[in-house]
Amino acid sequence: MMANTLPKLHNAMWPGLVGKEPDTDHPPISLERMLELTVAAEVDGQKFEGVDLFLFHPHTDPDATDDQLKSMADKIAGHGLNVGSLVAPIWPGTVGDTAFGDAEQRKKFVLAVEKACRIGKILNEHGVRKYGVIRIDTAGGPGAFAEDEAGNLQRASETFREAGAVAESYGERLAAEGEICWGGMHSWRTMLKLLEATGLPKTVGFQADLAHTYLYLLGYNAPEDALLQPGYSQAEFDAAYTTMTDALRPWTIDFHVAQNDGSVHGTGSHDRTGRHCVADDPNGKLDITAASGYWLKDAAERGIQHICWDGCMFPNAVLEDAKTWNTILAAMIKVREAHGWS
């Protein structure tokens, strides 16, 4: 039987940046080093086929010149890799600001999306990027969101619509990340409300991450929306996971393979969120292959052409260990064998 060739297998570059701080025991890891670690991984002759990028310093200047971006594209292509999804620099302290803030903050958010779309256009024209989306979140915390949930939901959806119009003008789609540390996205029900209020299903969709969405089930930042209680059975998990994925899968246009041990974790300036674990973590709560299948049903019809591993806030020593990447790649291959297509 012929092996599946899709979705393409990508590695995320932002684990070298998220939660990393200079002059600590977990300093940023350069884009070049992250590319080297990605290319070095190999399992039974199969390798990673691409990378997803974080569009901010020190990996990528969001205001880089065309020539600088083309040089980066040449470097990535020279490693035999494609570029897939791009993370827009939408947070305070980067280019953007919160999507449910005041008019000036929301204007910065849309500007950050436009800068990401410009970079995407250059990478597309170069040829190193042939698929993928622009990833966003609300860039504000659940506490701030809860101060005026109805008003903030309305403001966030209006900002997402404005950003969606920009994305459409570039031929891009936006994927809102389901991560519990972002207001309006901290609960699977609220995430769904935000997508429905935005009302652009062809342009603004959902980015599902196995580690983050596992915490949706437990209602960590929204106990009223919990679908599971501690000590749940496999049958209860299956029913809860079906409920959540049936609601969010039709919106899902970007997907991260990951593992979670049921806890939250934060490093540096990044707030606590679903802990990313190595693929073979003995405390992992998820059957990675089985859980991925819930999200990847009809994935091709939703325009998904690649999947990406996400391991944010791993210690640098773990990221520098070749075994980490071979184990991750092996897990990705199993997902494609079980749920992929050609």
Image (cartoon, rainbow, N blue to C red):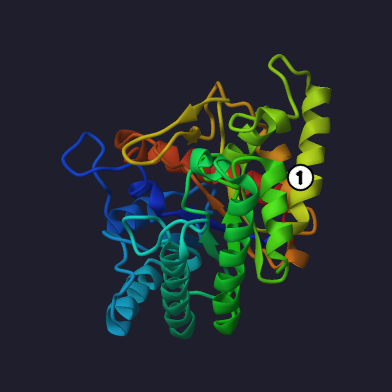
- Residue 335 in sight in this render: yes
Image quarter (top left, top right, bottom left or bottom right) of the N terminus: bottom right
Compared with 104, 236 (above or below) is: above
Q: Position of residue 116 (x, y in %)?
A: 44, 71
Compared with 221, 11 (above or below) is: below
Q: Where is residue 212 in the image (x, y as percent from the top left)?
A: 58, 39
Compared with 21, 200 (above or below) is: below
Left or right: 268, with 179 as reference point? left
Residue at position x 72%, y 50% from top? 192
Question: Which residue is tagged 1?
Answer: 245
Which of these two is toward me, 335 or 152?
152
Mark 1: few/some/many CA within 10 Å (<14, 14-19, 20+) = many
- Residue 3 in sight in this render: no
Image quarter (top left, top right, bottom left or bottom right) of the C terminus: bottom right
Q: Determine which quarter of the picture holds residue 122.
A: bottom left
Q: Please tell me whether mark 1 sits on a helix, a strand or a loop.
A: helix
Which of these two is toward me, 226 or 135?
226
Left or right: 183, with 193 as reference point? left
Residue at position x 30%, y 43% from top? 20
Q: Position of residue 250 (x, y in %)?
A: 78, 57
Q: Determine which quarter of the picture holds residue 72.
A: bottom left
Q: What residue type is labelled 1?
A: Thr
